[in-house]
Structures are given as structure tokens and as C-alpha cells.
Amino acid sequence: MGDAIVGVVANPLSGRDIRRLTARASVFPTAEKANMIQRMLTAFHAVGVHRVLLSTDLGGISAAVFRAIGRRRAQDGGWPEVEFLDGQPIRQTAQDTLDAVRRMVTAGARVIVCLGGDGTARVTASAAGDVPMLALSTGTNNAFPAVREATIAGLAAGLVATGAVPADGVVTRAKMLEARVGDRAETALIDVAVSTQRHVGARAVWDPATLTQLFCAFAEPDVIGLSSILGQLSPVARHEPYGVTARLAPQAPAQVLAPIAPGLVMLVGVAEIGRMHPGSVHAVDARAGVIAVDGERELTFEPGERPTVRLRPDGPRCVDVPAVLAASARLGLLRRPSHGPAWY
Amino acid sequence: MTETAEQKALTREQLLSAYRMMRAIREFEERVHAEFATGEIPGFVHLYAGEEASAAGVCSHLDDRDTIASTHRGHGHCIAKGVDIGEMMAEIYGRKTGSCHGKGGSMHIADLSKGMLGANGIVGGGPPLICGTALAAKIKGTGGVGVAFFGDGASNQGTTLESMNLAAVWNLPAIFVAENNGYAETTSSTWSVASDNIADRAAAFGMPGVIVDGFDFFAVHEAAGEAIARAREGGGPTLLEMKFTRYFGHFEGDQQTYRAGEVQHARAKLDCLKRFAARATETGELTRSDLDAVDAEVAGMIDRAVTDAKAAPPPVEADLLTDVYVRY
């Protein structure tokens, strides 16, 4: 099996921003994030992962896992060896996720599981390179990460990491968007929105009246977030090779009710819907403002900077959990020899 | 529909006022730090430098209807709520011209005429007070809110948790601002706060809990704006957790052997004043000379406050029993 190493990065701050206040978004407790990691460790062990690299944090997640390892009894069953990626300063910013993912890639992780919302998945994807990632939802806006039982995700990640299920057909490459302002760039996994707001502020976008343009790598009708605006008007699936863009204005001819964030179903005006083809560069029209990636304000721009957005086909490689477990069933990977009389 | 905090762009005057507020707090604290070392200031002082965006981002939404309760680290809250800086400095020097006639000192600066219920030497002493003022505002229908600032240490106190429960049960226009600077005196909050994030506790009281980058004025201003607007409209209490670092020790004289490096990093990379100045000039909303003018004005104001305080008389024996008893 070689080095069946899995990296797990968990964002202690996911599910904590202003959307708790503006939209009654859910709170994802630290204890549950730590429990999810422990359930994954059990699953990893069951399918032969022997080493796990775990991010460290000041939010109490890695500390809870560390304590659990110390308290574990023999009858609780085995866990893989867990290496805590400590020794680097913890800034309590996205930099911590970047640092951890880079270390996992360097250390030869075969799969990187990330626990967070769209923001955490976006940051993980930007550093994971060609290592397959599996994004599990513990955040606010979850268009990209799946809401899925961690044990199942752990089995899938483990089966890919050990090579028991070959990556062909179960690891697929996602699209992504790149927003560029001069030499500053940010990637997005789902959407890029242009706001006339001048400051990054509390980051989240919860008022569509401030938006002038929207670019979506995919816009699925049943997905939460800004991409839902186009998900109802011009749906594009994750696997389709193109994206979709539009102009937004409160008085625009097409009006749509869109679930732009958890707890917020807003009326949005839409005009000039168009396709985005991979590689083609789209100009941002606003003179000055801020660009939100996957629903969070990140890049400010001033008059004369003329930002651009393009769709890139070379997004992160993602583990398709249902496909992995279907392959496992087909190959009989979780079957074991019977000890007694056959029942069937 | 009311305008959201996100939509509401700050005017030039509001930006200048916010910068003046933060600069005044910084200058005040840096000066007290220097003056305390001379031995002229009696008692203890706990300095707020580094945390300015919290006081300014929250208090810039408040008006005469509103009350705030502060902490032992209260100078920033006092300045942001409009307490006279000269009277504050005189109070710290223990002079008769001080806001409490020189009998309170740093930890008891109060000015009820400004809705400032007082700095507070009792850790966790503030939250119960604002439940009272928030209840009064609710009964009288003034639209006012009560804001309690408290630290990560106070977040573990029964008084704070009881107040949050009461505010939720009575649906009070109360805002709980947890200023998590990482240490309760010398004890790390990552060790002493069981939920790790103070904001997480809000869920147990059925109120929103939000983590805010406490070094970023714009982030604080937006989050506080939403929370305060919601409270004014009858939406109930909110818990905001500011994460940041204090630049000085717990008190002046603290050797700070429990931490290393983080203050230099914060001063260089995260500082609220530097970030505000960079951002507001980048957008062209303010110019460097606007900011320089504020800096000069504030420096002069703090200089005068110190000179006046040093020249002012101390209380005399005849003042001993004044302001002590109240006739109901």
C-alpha cells in the first residue's frame, strides 16, 4: 500500500461570522468538528490508512483530538498514527489553512480532507495542487463542501489514499474562477461577485443591492449562496465545461428570488446572462469596489485597476464520495472472509 | 426595509470621527504608559492600546439614548462614548477636576451624563448593569441599547452568563461585546475558555454569536451596526467576540513572561490604525494630510490633558464625604 497518508485540515473559525447575526446561519460547535475527525480516524483505520497529518489550531479542535488519543482504550479499536502539524506560528487567519495544506502536500498526503465552509474549501484548493481533496461542510455557506457523515467521508478518503479504489472515475477535476486585480489574484470554486462596497469589512455579502456583476463556475438550482441567483435562471452543473455570468441591478428586467445565504431569500434583479468559456477573460465594469469570492469580500480595487475574471478548467481534484463507495461495493473491498457458516 | 450596515457607506465625517476616536485612545494610552513610569500616577492602570477598533467600531453607532458598561481596561470605552479626555486624565492623576473628582482613578471613571456607566474593577461587573439599562430603555420605549464590554476572563464569570441568559429571556436591547485579547491577566484564553470561542456560547442562550476581527474597524463597525440595529428594532441581544491582542501588559508593570512575539507581530501587521489609514487613503475617501491633521490635533489635546491634570489640585479632606451618600 505504500504511504497511505491522509491530511485533515479543520478550520476553527468556520461557521462563526456575521451571518449568525444577519441570517440566523447555523453554528457548528468546535466539539462536533473534533468528533468528526475522530469518526474519520476510525474509518481511516478500518481501510488501512496508517498515518494522518492533522492541522493544529487555537480553536480547540486539534487539542480535543489530542486528548482523545491519550484517553483511548484498547477496546476502542485502532486509529492510525496521528501527526499534529505544529511548530509553526498560528495566526488565526486563512494563512493557517494554507500552511497546513502545503505541509501535507510536501509530506506526501494522498488525500486532503478539509472541514469548513466554502471559504475553507477555497483556501485548501488553492494549495492542494494535484492532491485530491474532499471537502466536508462545517461552515456557513456550503455550495462546494458536502454535508455528509464524516465516517463515510473517512472511508472514501481512505480507500482513495490507499489506492484500493483507483482514482480514475472517482476523482474528478473541478472548475474554478480566477479574479485578478493587477498582481493580486484570488480563486473561487463557485462564484465571484463584484460589489460597490469599498471595504472588506465583515467579509460576508448579505445585501444583493450592492452587487453589480456575478460570475459562476457552476450554478445549480438546489445550491445555497450567490450562485443560486443564476441557478434558477440559467443553471450550469458542476461537470459542465463552461460557466455563467450576468449583470445585477435592483431594477433589472429579470427578477428572481434567490437563497443568497442561509436564511436569506432575496429578490435580485438580473440582466445580460452570458456563458463563460474556459480561459476567456471577462472585464469587471465597476470603477471601484470589492470582489467577493465564494460569497466573501476579499479583493478591493480602485479606479484604473480594471479587474478581470476568468474561468479555469484546472481547479482542484475532488474525491467523489458516492462513486468511491460504489466502486468499493463493486470490487468487494469491505467484504471480509466469513468465520462461521455462510448466511447467503 | 432598513438599509443594512453592509450597504451603508461611511461618510467622510464618520471616517474622520472614527479615526480621531481611535487615535485619541492610542495617544491617551501611550501617554499614560509613559507617564505611569515616572511614578506620578497613583494606583493601577490597565491600558487598551491595540483594541481601539472595538470601542470605536461599536460606539460610533451609539447616541445619547444608549449606555455602555466597561471594564478595568476602560479608557478606550470612555473616550469612544464621549467622556471628556481632560477630566479622564485628571481622574487618573487623582485630581479634583477629574470625572469622579479624583476619588475613583483609572478603574472607576464614569460619566452617567454620557451614558458611560463606569469602568469596573469587578471582572464581569458590567453585564448585569446593562441588563438594567436595556430593560429601562425597553420599558420606556426610547430605542436605546445597553452595551457591555468585557474580557475573556469575565466571559467565564457567572455574572456574565446570567446576564446573557436574562437578556435573552427578556429579549433586551443588549449587546455583549467580548473583547478576547487572549489573556485573563496572565492565563491564556485558549486554556481557560472551555468552548474556546466565546461567541459559541451565544447559541446556548438562543442569541446570535459572531466572531469579529477586532483589529479591523470596518469589520467591527459592520457587525456592531447589524447587532445594534437589530436590538433597537426589538430583535434582542447579540454576543460579539472581538479577537485581538493588547499591546501592553495586563497592568503597567506586568513583566509579560507568559507571551512572546505576538505584540510585535500585531503592531507591525495587524494594527487597527495602520490598517484604517491605509484603506481609507487607498480608496481616496481620506487623504494622508487629513489624517496628519487629526494626529496633530489629538497630540495637542492629550498634551493639554496631561499638563492640566498635573497642575490641578488633589481632593482635600473636606471632600472625603462628598459624592459618597445619595439621598433618595
Image (spheres, rainbow, N blue to C red):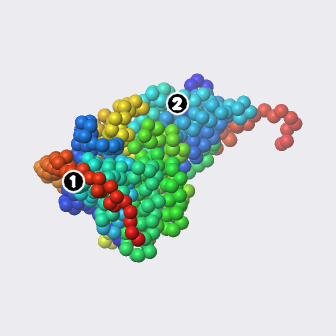
**Residue placed at 55% from the left, 33% from the top?**
A6
Name the chain letter of the residue that bears numbered label 2: A
Q: Percent from the top left, x then y, of residue A226?
A: 41, 58
Using the numbered discs, state the Cα–Cα distance from disc 2 to disc 1 in whole angstroms. Answer: 52 Å
Q: Percent from the top left, x then y, of residue A8?
A: 53, 36
Instruction: Quadrant for the N terminus of chain A, please.
Output: top right
Q: How many marks?
A: 2
B75 or A203: nearer the viewer: B75
Q: Residue furthest front?
A: B318
Instruction: Specify the label residue A182 is tagged with.
Output: none
Amino acid type of the residue tagged 1 in the rendering: Gly
Q: Is residue B81 above or below residue A169?
A: below
Instruction: Specify the label residue A84 is tagged with.
Output: 2
Q: Residue furthest right?
A: A341
Relative to B14, is B219 on the left or the right?
A: right
Q: Percent from the top left, x then y, of residue A244?
A: 38, 56
Q: Residue furthest bottom?
A: B140
Instruction: Quadrant for the C terminus of chain A, please.
Output: top right
Helix, strand or loop under label 1:
helix
The quarter holding residue A106 reads top left
Helix, strand or loop under label 2:
strand
Relative to A43, is A90 on the left or the right?
A: left
Name the chain letter of the residue that bears numbered label 1: B
B235 or A335: nearer the viewer: B235
Residue that badge 1 annotates: B86
Relative to B186, is B61 on the left or the right?
A: left
Q: Is residue B106 visible?
A: yes
Q: Is residue A321 visible?
A: no
Amino acid type of the residue tagged 2 in the rendering: Phe
Crowd band around label 2 with a 10 angstrom C-alpha radius: few (<14), some (14–19), many (20+): some
Foreground tag (2 vs 1): 1
**Residue placed at 43% from the left, 40% from the top?**
B185
